[in-house]
Amino acid sequence: MFPLAVGIARRVCLVRPLVVGVTATLAIQIAGQSVFGLNYINYVFSGETREQFYERNVPGANSAAWLNREFPEGGKLGFMNRQLAYLLTPPRYMMHPHIQAVIDARPTADDGQAFIMQVRKKGLTHLLLPGDWDRVDSVPGDQTPNFAMIGRLAGQGCFRALKKFQTVHISSRTLRGFGSEDLKTADTLFEVVPEHCP
């Protein structure tokens, strides 16, 4: 296609506008790629470790690092943050509400018994859930029926909070260098306590 454009430009005496257009396009592309690559260039030349890079760029990376070291033998983890699928090494199942249907984790799901039955069927012993669940009587984060159900199950003792991880919700990996701010958030690791479940 490009040789055809050059041929037509030569016949019509428009070589100069073609050169200017191609040069401008290349300059814009290179500038855009530089903006998107700045984060990774910083990693390569800063001496930052891989774990530090992950903590800076992947929400919940600190929880994944801890779980990879400390998760109990024989356990299986359920989690919702899709990005952690690439970092976690223990046996696990991603319960993302829009990517799977084995465990109903949709925001509208509120049947605690069905949820527990699905969690048991997958053999999950622990759940890593978004939010600060220090007070189970006040549902953290959004007030979706699903989180209200999880709060009720935790209040009944079906889920026992083991550890809270302070993490960040990254607004933009690309624009961080230009003033984009991250939001502080938390993830909570729960142990499933079957004898207290409905």
Image: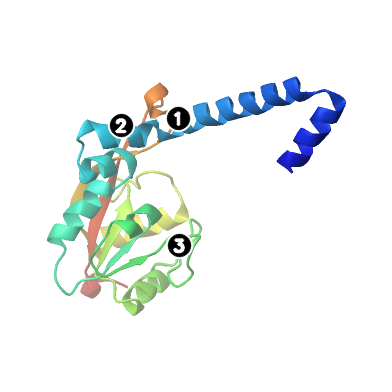
User: Relative to residue 27, is residue 149 drawn left or right?
Assistant: left
Tag 1: Cα neighbours inside 10 Å, few (<14), some, or many (≥20)?
Answer: few
Q: CA distance from mark 1 to mark 3?
A: 46 Å
198 up-or-down from 43: above or below: below
Q: Amino acid at mark 1?
A: Ser
Q: Which mark, by number, is residue 34?
A: 1
Q: CA distance from mark 2 to mark 1?
A: 11 Å
Q: Nearer the viewer, residue 124 or 168?
A: 168
Q: Secondary structure at mark 2?
A: helix
Image quarter in which the N terminus is found:
top right
Q: Which residue is mark 2?
A: 42
Q: Amino acid at mark 2?
A: Asn
- Residue occupying the point 19% across, 59% down: 68
Residue 5 in percent (x, y) is at 77, 36
Q: Which mark, by number, is residue 164?
A: none
Tag 2: Cα neighbours inside 10 Å, few (<14), some, or many (≥20)?
Answer: few
| Residue furthest right as drawn | 12
Kindly tell me whether residue 133 is visible in this rendering: no
Q: CA distance from mark 3 to mark 2?
A: 44 Å
Image quarter for residue 10? top right
Q: Which residue is mark 3?
A: 110
Residue 141 in percent (x, y) is at 38, 43
Residue 127 in percent (x, y) is at 28, 62
User: Relative to residue 97, is residue 29 drawn left or right?
Assistant: right
Image quarter in which the C terminus is found:
bottom left
Q: Nearer the viewer, residue 36 or 24?
A: 24
